[in-house]
Amino acid sequence: MKVLKAIVIGLCLIAGASAQQEEPPREWIDRDTGHRVIRLSNDPGSASLYFHQNPYTPDGKKLLITVPNGLATVDLKTRAIDKIVDGRVNVIIAGHKTGRIYYVKGGVVYATDPNTKQTQEIAKLPPAPEGGSISVNTVNADETLLAGTITEGGVPNLPARPQQPDARSAPNSRGQTGADSYPGKGEMMERRLAARLPMQLFTVNTKTGEVKTILRRNDWLNHLQFSPTDPNMLLFCHEGPWHKVDRTWIIRSDGTGLTKLHTRTMNMEIEGHEFWGADGKHVWYDLQTPKSQVFWLASYELSTGSRMWYNLPIEEWSVHYNVSPDGKLFAGDGGGPNSVAAGHNGQWIYLFRPQEKKDWNSPDLPDSAKMIKTGFFKTEKLVNLAKHDYRLEPNVTFTPDMKWIVFRSNMFGPTHVFAVEIAKAEQTKR
């Protein structure tokens, strides 16, 4: 009897291991939404980039992803995967002009051509101050400048950020969620903000290697993003618990034009996870007035200072948003049980179609030109993420042809890269 029991247990263990090793489906129709979903990655532990890091080559043909021991591209037409960088690196972006893949390894910035795999050393980073740190986070539109931060000193006994599932697959997943979503993060954010460490915002010339400091602050500087169109415009944030900081700022690459894009006007108002529109004319950001109560996706137009706020119900809030290349559609990656909209069944990939009521924004109203314009989203659910662990954030992006939304997910266990088709699948394919 004992032998039989041991055999049964052994068979169960083998069956369990086999199930764990079974590959996720390559393609399926989401039964809850009717949209086709495809798996783009082959290796468990592969991931798409953070939501504001450009992953697409300028011709729209290739998608940059991280793989367990390096970087690879996915041919968006054939789905062929080509590994282009070996080893652990911190990926920055795919260059907007040349499509070269920029990354940091061992204190040096490199760029690799995704077609020829030729690699060029771009710049050696200056040494970090004693007890401090240095990082490079973005490349400008014509690939002539890098930008990064230097932190002078550190916070003693600072709690470590909680690990994301398969965190090895996302080596540069910065600024995860602005709210204190997971145990330990809230304390870390509070203590880091209170430390008021001296910081520098700097640029590096990619041709000469010249390093220039363009801003010095005791604010916590983070979330650097060069404009996708203006090579001299840089978006960044004052990091910290969002209800304690006016977060979103821009500055020009020569240090001029420092501008705060949003000022909090009520207690517990929060805004953040800012990102550029593809035209470089608008900055978008998550806004809550106040936190966890009233939800908006808000924008600031650089040339005029005008603002547009789109309202969302709590069930449709997302950790991250993104906008299509033509600016006509938006996407969101939902939220988990520890997010600011916790407990409202928001675990979906969403498509948002902006709507505007003309009587809300009539030019005939007093001081209309000075007022914030408002609208709302018509929402469509694309992928059910009920089995996704939101400690790993999906981070949605639109493909350049605007036919798919790319995201990462661990809904089958290991992290993989997926894409969902924006057009609903034909009934005959279901």
Image (tube, rainbow, N blue to C red):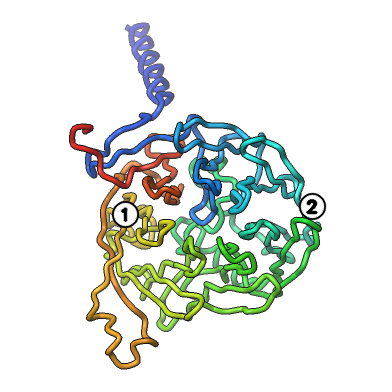
Task: State whether residue 169 is above or below residue 358.
Answer: above
Instruction: Specify the farthest residue to the bottom.
Output: 366
- Whole-angstrom CA distance, mark 1 to mark 2, is 41 Å
In the image, is 105 to the left or to the right of 263? Answer: right
Residue 304 x, y percent position in the rendering: 47, 80
Helix, strand or loop at label 2? It is strand
Which comes sooner in the sequence, label 1 or label 2? Answer: 2
- Is the residue marked by circle 1 packed among few (<14), some (14-19), or many (20+) residues within 10 Å? many
Which quarter of the image is occupied by the N terminus? Answer: top left
Which one is in front, 235 or 389? 235
Which one is in front, 238 or 425? 425
Residue 127 x, y percent position in the rendering: 80, 57
Q: Amino acid at mark 1?
A: Leu
Helix, strand or loop at label 1? It is strand
Which disc number belongs to residue 44? none
In the image, is 133 to the left or to the right of 248? Answer: right
Give the residue number, with chain letter if any, for mark 2: 124
Q: Amino acid at mark 2?
A: Lys
Residue 413 x, y percent position in the rendering: 41, 35
In the image, is 399 to the left or to the right of 32? Answer: right
Give the residue number, with chain letter if any, for mark 1: 351
Q: Quadrant of residue 215?
A: bottom right
Residue drawn at 33 percent across, 88 percent down:
368
The answer to whether residue 175 shows anywhere in this view is yes
Residue drawn at 33 percent across, 58 percent down:
342
